[in-house]
Image (cartoon, helix red, strand yellow):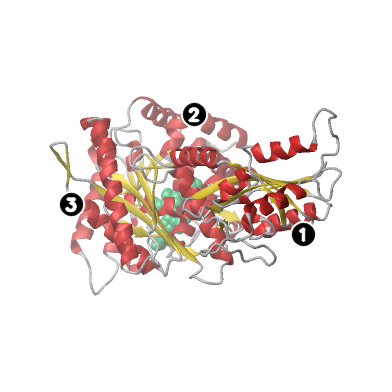
Amino acid sequence: MRERAVSGHPDRTGRTHGATLPSVTERNGTTKEPGVRADRPAAAREATVARDVPEPAHECPAASFGDYRTAFHAARLPMAVLDREGRILAANPAFGELLGTDPGRLVAATAADLADLGSDPRVQAAYREVLSGHSDRLRCTRRLKHPSGHTLWVEITVEPLSGSERILLSVADSSDRHDLLARLRHLQMHDPVTRLPNRALFFERLSSALESASVATTGTGRIGLCYLDLDGFKAVNDTLGHRVGDRLLSAVAQRLTLCAEHAADRGTGNGRAHLVARLGGDEFALLVEDSTGTDQLSELAQCALDALQRPFDLAGQRLSVSASIGVVERAAAGTTATGLMQAADTTLYWAKEDGKARWTLFDPERNAHRMTRQALSSTLRPAVDRGEFTLEYQPLVGLDDGRAEGVEALVRWRHPQFGMLSPNRFIALAEENGAIVELGRWVLEQACRQARAWQLERPGDRPLFVSVNVAVRQVWDSDLVADVAGILAATGLPPELLQLELTESAVMGSAGRPLQALQALSDMGVRIAIDDFGTGYSNLAYLSRLPVSVLKLDGSFVRGFRSQEHPNPADETIVEALVALAHRLGLTVTAECVESAEQAARLRRIGCDTGQGWLYSRPVPPERIDALLDAGGRTGG
Ligand code: C2E
Ligand code: MG
Ligand code: MG
């Protein structure tokens, strides 16, 4: 049995297809169709109806033709018998009642018009298949308009009567079931607290808006979204209870709805109010279909902020809240619901990050930066395994003779997509996600291996030491002492040729494990240097009690006395005092960022021990250090 079931439920936009019934009856009681006269005597009409009722194929001997006719008339199910053209040959009283007319008047009417089988092409095609005998049944749901004004939802079945050329059309009124389903759907799609559309309905509307906007020829083809989150709502819930919290949400919903309505009234909503939905918790969304640009959306966002600014009076409580809003506006084509929501979510996060109580517009550049950070962060670990990192070395030069005494190892990432990346782009990320432990171990091993190679290549020379940067997390999250001992043993580098650079903040307040680690390393013969000294606490007295032997003065000090025209005596005095004090405490001092001979001369006069900077050399690949050593370790400075 082939059967066609075609549904005539409302589409996503809530539009339904339907027919007004009965189209055959004019106000004066005559019918439109030719050949049927409304003024025919009732008896004659009766005869027409009776004559056209077909005889059943499998007739039970006990039941006569009259019985079937009586049953057809008495049936509560509205039915009509049609010919192969779809014209009504007979209709029972229930059918007449459903359509609000005398069944006799329906004779010769076109069933498709009465039962709305022609407005939907799919239904129409399936109906024709049954009429032509190519299909055995059609079932569909249609929405009909009763002449008294109300609408009916009906289940229509069309099937051939066996052994006859006739077709039976039956109509079951399913309005009650439909209403119930509609009520259930409303409950399912709305939030009970605010009565706003909920997340499910919001996504349904968003998807359908994106779908229709990207194919429609009318409208702007754009879409906009304000994604709003109340600031500090949790505190209201926690301190005043959930009942007050719910009332506040409901009051917020009302104000947002008013905003959306006003925007529509002002003509910015293309006559349609924007959808306001509660997405969950204290999150709301205002969806703008056919948006006209970012101005429209930022205006709406500002309106929402203004609306929420007035205090709320709730059960004797006066409450003030603010909100943060992420605003996104873009062409619908190529936009997915998930993509739009992600952008809105990121933008809302920026609004919070930028200080709350504001709206923030989506910024593709800021987003690209975030995406790059994310991409870098997630690929750091595998990049260590793939060998994407490399080391450059920068000489640490004796200020009195200009000879390289050591080198600082500085890591770079040869990124397959972004090119050569400086450590400023990824060290902080590696610290955040812990990849610094593996990366740091690799740097340490690589640097020690290289320093040992230089030492072995030049047995007669004073060997270069290597200075390696160590992040705080390496001290806390890994066994740095064991790693260093293992690497020194594996590479054969003497401990006194290794220096570890830690920042001031990493060693300040050291107690317990980090302090023990520093002590163990120092006992091993490894030198500890404080990197970027002067940017943190600069507590020399404290540092002298730690196993630290070198201070690396931050570049900002040297930069302070950069120019001859504008010498900064204050900086010079401070550096002089620092160096003197460091020496008294048994520390040596290295100045960072030495860029000019003049700076070098002043540092030398002040008594600084070593310098590092572009004056001597930029950080360079190891082969260039080879060349420097070949030249006797003398740098350009
Ligand atoms: P840092 O340890 O203070 O390293 C010195 C930085 O100053 C280097 O930047 C170097 O290229 C730059 N520099 C050197 N001389 C001059 C100069 O004369 N003028 C100016 N303007 N800059 C100069 P780089 O290589 O970009 O490294 C940046 C920071 O990244 C380093 O600062 C260090 O804190 C960190 N870093 C580098 N390699 C590693 C590593 O292997 N592990 C860890 N944990 N951090 C590292
Ligand atoms: Mg350093
Ligand atoms: Mg430094």
Secondary structure at badge 2 equals loop
User: How busy is the neighbourhood of tag 1: few (under 14 within 10 Å), some, or many (20 plus)?
Assistant: few
Question: Mark 2 or mark 1, which has the lower sequence index?
Answer: 1
Q: Which residue is mark 3?
A: 310
Report whether 354 appears left or right of 51: left
Disc 1 residue type (three-letter): Glu
Q: Percent from the top left, x then y, of residue 267? A: 34, 69
Disc 2 residue type (three-letter): Asp
* Residue at point 37%, 53% (across, down): 350
* Residue at point 49%, 31% (across, down): 478
Q: Nearer the viewer, mark 1 or mark 3?
A: 1
Secondary structure at badge 1 equals loop
Q: Nearer the viewer, mark 2 or mark 1?
A: 1
Q: Quarter holding the C terminus? A: bottom left
Q: Which residue is mark 2?
A: 479
Q: Which residue is mark 1?
A: 85
User: How busy is the neighbourhood of tag 3: few (under 14 within 10 Å), some, or many (20 plus)?
Assistant: few
User: How busy is the neighbourhood of tag 2: few (under 14 within 10 Å), some, or many (20 plus)?
Assistant: few
Secondary structure at badge 3 equals loop
**Quadrant of res 173:** top right
* Residue at point 51%, 39% (across, down): 176
Cα separation, mark 1 vs mark 3, equals: 68 Å
Question: Mark 3 or mark 2, which has the lower sequence index?
Answer: 3
Report whether 546 appears left or right of 68: left
**Quadrant of res 251:** top left
Disc 3 residue type (three-letter): Arg
* Observer able to see residue 219: yes
